[in-house]
Amino acid sequence: MSATTVTTQPFAGQRPGTSGLRKKVTVFQQPHYLENFVQSLFDILPDRVGQTLVLGGDGRFHNRVAVQTILRMAAANGFGRVLVGQGGLLSTPAASAVIRKRAAYGGIILSASHNPGGPDGDFGIKYNIGNGGPAPEKITEAIYQRTTEITAYQTTADTADLDLDTLGTTTLDGMVVEVIDSVALYADLMQTLFDFDAMRAWFAAGNRMRMDTMCAAGGPYAKAVLEGLLGAPAGTVVNGEPLEDFGGHHPDPNPAHATELIAAMTGAGAPDFGAASDGDADRNMILGRDFVVTPSDSLAVMAAHATKVPGYAAGLKGIARSMPTSCAADAVAKALGIPSYETPTGWKFFGNLLDADRVTLCGEESYGTGSDHVREKDGLWAVLFWLNLLAATGESVESLVRGHWARFGRHYYSRHDWEGIPTERADALMAALRAQLPALAGQSFGALTLQMADDFSYTDPVDGSVSSRQGVRLLFEGGARVVFRLSGTGTEGATLRVYLERYEADPAQHDQPTQEALADLIQLADRVARIRELSGQSAPAVIT
Ligand code: VG1
Ligand code: CO
């Protein structure tokens, strides 16, 4: 066996989106497609020789094939060592934890996250840097540029597939391949942050939980921590076996897709606490009995109570949220006297703030929450944070959230996803919206007066890098907002995301159904952006 050079030609469209390169499995199955992207990545890492790389994925269809391909290429490109998750599996937060703990140079995560899997589903790849977090735009852009000019890649010829299932070390053309137990490493990290005794006592007292890991990467981690270390009854974790097609389900933890869990959490016999995680286990949904917590509220509640959790007992340095995420966390930061930051969508924008110790907690409206313990959002971490709060306060999920609203006011919030819009139509809609911006400010729409309308632009306070065109914002007097942006994770047509938010201080008004509370804004969004007319669709596909 030896390193070989294979001639290739560029593929169009290998630009990473919000979270890596995501395409249909069939696209990734084309000869050289994955190889081109991986070689482009390696080419822009000139000091890679001898370095350690972390490698694994969410276990979806094509994961194992891709791991073998990347191992051969890593060996031929001079890496010294690759740490592979057992079975080729690594949840996204575990990959981040391994990179940090083992001081690796970086890592490759194979995931299309919450997108459906299987031969007809999606596949994805992304690169994380040495801090454990997603590569910043400067790097993803450099990879993309390289994919447009690539002519050859290096691989190791004539080698059999490596055994990914047995823990231990082998070599491949001089490179060390170490199959690691990422569950143990991750579980150890969780024990440094949370009060495991209090959580064990919560279960021992007869409280019940249902954790749905959606037949995806989170299962082994959730089982080891909840049913293993915390003594939760067997069966607490459902859909706990990772499957290549996620059991045919859509591994997206929101009320629209986790319908089984929502049903199980309804009615008097339901468990006290419900939760779900996504394909790569970085997202989380938090539920009480007959009660759904919005991700934006979840971040705010966690921040308000953080000092009750051992890992955060010293207080928070600051809080960051993505721009479309509700302002609920800002209200908490203000009350705590700590800074809050508003970043573009995608976890890569939190990395600098975390590295510079400016923030401790981060969150996104898309069911993502995390902290400075890793550089990714972390589904099970968020679930344990809530479990620790339940155990420490003796309160229910619902009473914690209602108490929060009573203190800070309620930020009614919803996201409407208009999926499968032909790309030209979606682009035209956004262009028309942008063209209107100068004329919009100051206009009144019924009771709503527009204070400001712009296209969000972010200047990273740490390195000064600028990211523009990150979403059109309509900001109204009184704190209501509507945000429009196109998804950067889809693989079919375009998805328009419309984010709706309205602040309500009066506790007597905290019990309205969300869609009713936001009805004015929903109507206005359609009128201003002409969504129905320009998308050609009559209703959003998913409302969360
Ligand atoms: C979506 C979410 C975004 C999240 C991203 C990756 O991106 O809106 O908040 O960071 O997915 O999440 P977009 O561009 O489709 O809106 V994960 O769990 O898919 O890696
Ligand atoms: Co995910």
Image: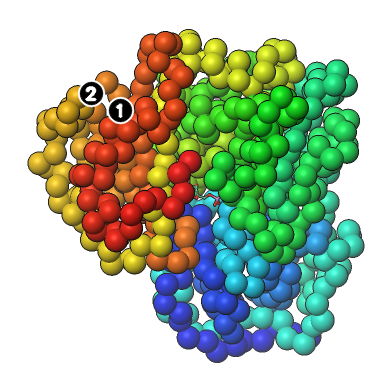
Q: Is residue 194 above or below residue 280?
A: above
The kind of secondary structure element at disc 1 is loop
Residue positioned 36% across, 51% down in the render? 539
Residue 103 visible (yes or no): no
Q: Amino acid at mark 2?
A: Glu
The kind of secondary structure element at disc 2 is loop
Q: Quadrant of residue 476?
A: top left
- Total number of numbered discs in the rendering: 2
- The residue beneath circle 2 is 477
- Which quarter of the rendering shows the N terminus? bottom right
How dense is the environment of label 2, judged by Cα within 10 Å: few (below 14), some, or many (20 and up)? some
In terms of depth relative to the viewer, which is nearer, 203 or 377? 203
Q: Quadrant of residue 448?
A: top left
Horizontal placement of 301 versus 373: left or right?
A: left
Percent position of residue 371, x then y: 59, 33
Percent position of residue 134, x then y: 54, 51
Q: What's the CA distance linking mark 2 and mark 1?
A: 7 Å
Given contact means CB atoms under 8 Å apart, are the residues at marks 2 and 1 in contact?
A: yes
Residue positioned 63% across, 31% down in the render? 287
In terms of depth relative to the viewer, which is nearer, 445 or 411? 445
In terms of depth relative to the viewer, which is nearer, 308 or 490? 490
Report if the beta carbon of the residue with label 2 is closer than 8 angstroms to ligand 1: no
Horizontal placement of 314 versus 82: left or right?
A: left
Percent position of residue 334, x then y: 42, 16
Q: Quadrant of residue 163?
A: bottom right
Residue positioned 83% across, 51% down in the render? 181
Residue 287 visible (yes or no): yes
Q: Is residue 248 above or below residue 500?
A: below
Percent position of residue 264, x then y: 70, 37
Colour scheme of the picture: rainbow
Mark carried by residue 480: 1
Residue positioned 54% across, 76% down in the render? 27
